[in-house]
Each structure stands twice: as C-alpha cells, then as structure tokens.
Image (cartoon, rainbow, N blue to C red):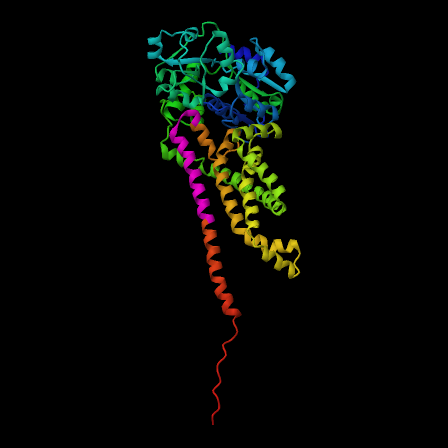
Amino acid sequence: MLALAVYLSTGPVHAATTATLAKDAGTLRVGSKRFTESYILAEILAQTAAVATREPPRVLQGLGNTAIVFEALRAGSIDVYAEYVGTIAQEILKSQQTLTLPQLREQLAPLGLGVDIPLGFNDGYALTMRKADAARLGVTTLSDLAAHPSLRFGLSNEFIGRADGWRGLAASYGLPQAPTGLDHGLAYDALAQGRTDVIDIYTTDAKIEALDLLVLVDDRKYFPRYDAVLLHRLDVPQRFPAAWSAIGTLAGSIDEAEMIGMNARAELHGVPFDRIARDHLGGQSVDAASGASGFLGKLFGPDLLRLTLQHLLLVAVSVLIACAVAIPAGVAVASSPRSRTIVLGVASLLQTVPSLAMLAVLISMTGRIGVLPALVALTLYALLPILRNTCTGLAEVPPGLRSAALALGLTPAQSMRLIDLPLARPTILSGIRTATSIAIGTATIAAFIGAGGYGERIVTGLALNDHGLLMAGALPAAALALVSELGFEAAAWRRRRTLSLTPRQDASAASPPRRVPMARNTG
C-alpha cells in the first residue's frame, strides 16, 4: 500500500477519484498479446476503466506478438496494453541496457507513447525441462545445457526472433542446440508428451508446478527483469482522465502469486478471462475452478451471435468486393491470352502469400489493425477463383454465337451482356462458391489482428491449449461453410430445374396450331 501511495503521489495518475470526476466520453481500446496473462490483464484494465467511461471499453484480445501489438498502439488502433519493462527496453527500444521507468518515458515520448502504473509483479523469461530428465542429466542451470547438445529445444517463435531471446541467450551461454519453433500454448503439451526436452516459459505460468517442471537457473543473469507496466498512447490520460485515474489504482495491486493463480484458473480450469478479472477486482476468495464452463457452454456461449455476425460480415463483404474487381477484370482480359496470363499470374502469386505474413504487411501499409486489413487480405485471397472461372466461362462460349450476335447487329458490349456472361454464369458462380469457402476458412485468421469472428475462440484456444475452445470456434466455421455450400447447391438446382422446364414451355408456345384435315367432298 505504501508503494501504491508513493506512486500515486509522484506518477502521472492524480489522486482524484472517479467519484468526483465526470465519466469520460469515447471508447477506450485495450489490447492484448496472444498469451494467457495478457488476456487476463486486458480484462482487468477494461473492467477497472469501465466504471469511469460512458461507453464500455473495447477489448481487442490476442492481437499477436509484440511487434503487431506495438504497431497497433503506435497507429492508434488501441490506446493501452500491458507490457513488460524488459521487452520495452530490448525489443521495442533496442537498448542493450536496463532502463528505469523515467528513462523509458524519456525515450518513448518522441514516439507519442508513455509507460506508467507498475502492476506489481515480474514475469520474466526462463527455460524449463521435466524434473526427472533434469535430475538424470544433472542439469540445474542454463550453463549446464551446453554440455548436452542432443537436447531438443522447442521455443516460441517470438522468443527465437527477439533481441532478448534465443540468439542472445545462445551466445551468452554457448548453447549449440538448434531450436524448433512452437506455439507457446502447445509447448507444454509437447514437453509433457516427450516430443521436446526444453521450452521457454514465462515465470508466472501456471503449468510449471502442475507438470512438475524445473525452471533452470539463469546463473549468468542474462534475462532482465520483466516488471509488468502499462504502455499507452501519450494522450490517453488527457482523453480519459476519469478512466486513467481508476486504472491508476491497479499500481502494485498484483503480485506473482496472484498472477500465477489467475493464470491457473484460465489454463487448468478453463475459467473465462472476464470472470477471472471480475473475481480478482472483487477481492473475494473463490474456488479455482469456479466459473468454468463445459464444451456446450463454450460452443453456445454468449459471444456466439456476435462472432457469427462478425464472421458473416468479413466473408460477405470480402467476396462481394472480390466479385466487383475480379469479374470485370476477367471480362477485360478474357480475349487477350497475354493479358490473361499476367493477371492470373498476379492473382496466383497473392494466393501463395501466407495469411499471417499478408496481415502483417497490410497492418504496416494501412497503419491499422482490425477489420480493414482483414477485409483487404480476404478480398485478395478470393480474387483468384472468381477471376479464373470468369476467364474460363467466357472461353467456353461458342464462337459461332458471338458471330451470330454481331451479324444480328449487336455491339460487342451488348453481346457480352446478353450472350457471353449469361452462358458463362454457371462457371462464374462456381468460382464465387469456391471463393466463399476459402473466405470462411481464412476469416478465422482475422482474429489474430482483432477483426473478430470465430477465430477469436480458436486463437484463445491455442493460447490456452484448450481443445474444447478450439472446437467451439472450428465447428461454427465448418457449419457456416456447410450452409454456404447448401445455399449454392440449392441455387444451382433451381437454375437447372428452370432450364429443364423452359424449352418445353417455349416449344409449346412457339409451335403452330395443328391443322385439322378437311373432309373431301365426294358428293
């Protein structure tokens, strides 16, 4: 409490309480990285600020690694998120030295950013292995690993690429191993099942004790402290004074044991993040498993309607835009083999770009996260099948029909509109059908940048290694794809039925009246 009082009296958060301040207008946007602790801290921030804002804060969960979340903060797509001083110093500011809070503030200010409100705990990087294996090999420190080059390292991709991660660690300790990249949420399973021997962890992870793991001693003090703080846009305290005052009460309010306990409720018992945050802020002692829900509760949870609408919006808008671009482009190049080859080649090239790489590039290009880059990416992926089928459908139109149309006095544009496109329509619709299926599946990736949809559950399930939550996101996406296929199939059946009936009706209407033979007068 003394540390909290000192901080509140000297830091940027004033002593005024939310009770004496008017509620803030606007929407405070809180971001998180893609691991359990960050999800929980985002909910704690949002719920703390909610009492002082007219509109509920918006939580953008699981935006990705440090680079993506930091870019979102700089671009103004989010206002604040929980970060760690070691990460800010080494990964963001590229400093090789340990920096104090005043030094961090000084270097972040030119970027329009600030760092404040230490939350009270340190969550550092460490390496761990199974206790039984460590005892058998005599490994207790990071230095001991150098004597065992055959050990299999499964490290998170972010840790492998970070300046304060694997490269510096391997150089400092002379480690000869070549690590394999693993998602952090899956690494514990890989270690428990014997598929890897050493993984990187956060020191507040809940599964360390549950899986009987040994945290190896950093005997050369390579890792800096990773005290949790809030990284925010510099104008947030001015735009949201009441909310910022409320958030300031979180200073020094969470210690390591509390954070480990909250992580355990999420990872070991499947309690939702918002429930964990609410229980923590309420200050009540609760059973660790309290609030956990079964598979049906996850599948038909209160977020199902919201996620469905978001997923439908992403798919429908991206496919419609792709149609508006690809069909005219296909019409324009269909008659020119060279142009057709170039355009289809570009569309094919776009299709090969990995979705996460595409999203990262688009975030950098647009300066935004969320719906806009997600829609652009989905549209680019939907172009190829529509464009290719448009060209194919037009190529299948018999040349004789075009000649007949011109002979009847139709212009090329009229011939395209009245003859070519109607005949090519089934093939074009087939391309749209394929593009829609691709978009439904690919839209799950949009959750990595805060665009919503069923991918939210999948991303969170990966972070928690929660197979039930993964299925709760995958099954609705599969059901939506099935409904889409049935809809296209029903439309195709109706068209085939219409075409099968039309010739008979036309023949009946067009045939001349039957001539009745007159009786010959023989009288």
Across and down, in percent, residue 245 comes to 56, 20
Rendered residue at 35%/19% (across/down): 194
Residue at the (40%, 9%) spot, across then down: 148
Compared to residue 477, the image places residue 126 above or below, namely above
The residue nearer to you, when weighing 396 against 303, is 396
Q: Any magenta on residue 201?
A: no
361 and 104: which is toward the camera: 361
Residue 71 point in image, percent of width and height: 58, 24
The percent position of residue 250, horizontal first and vertical second, equals: 50, 18
Image side of residue 383 versus residue 411, left or right: left
Q: Which residues are magenta?
A: 462-488
Q: What main secondary structure does the magenta stretch of the protein show?
A: helix
362 lies left or right of 137:
right
Residue 246 visible:
no
**What residue do we see at 39% from left, 7% from top?**
140
Q: Nearer the viewer, residue 55 or 272?
A: 272
- Based on the displayed image, in which of its 4 quarters is residue 409 positioned? bottom right
Is 311 drawn above or below residue 396 in the view shown? above
Question: Against 74, is 378 above or below?
Answer: below
The vertical placement of 383 against 147, above or below, is below
Return the residue found at the far bottom.
523
**Residue at the farthest top position:** 220
Q: Position of residue 42 (x, y in %)?
A: 50, 24
Count of numbered marks:
0
The answer to whether one can see residue 409 in this image is: yes
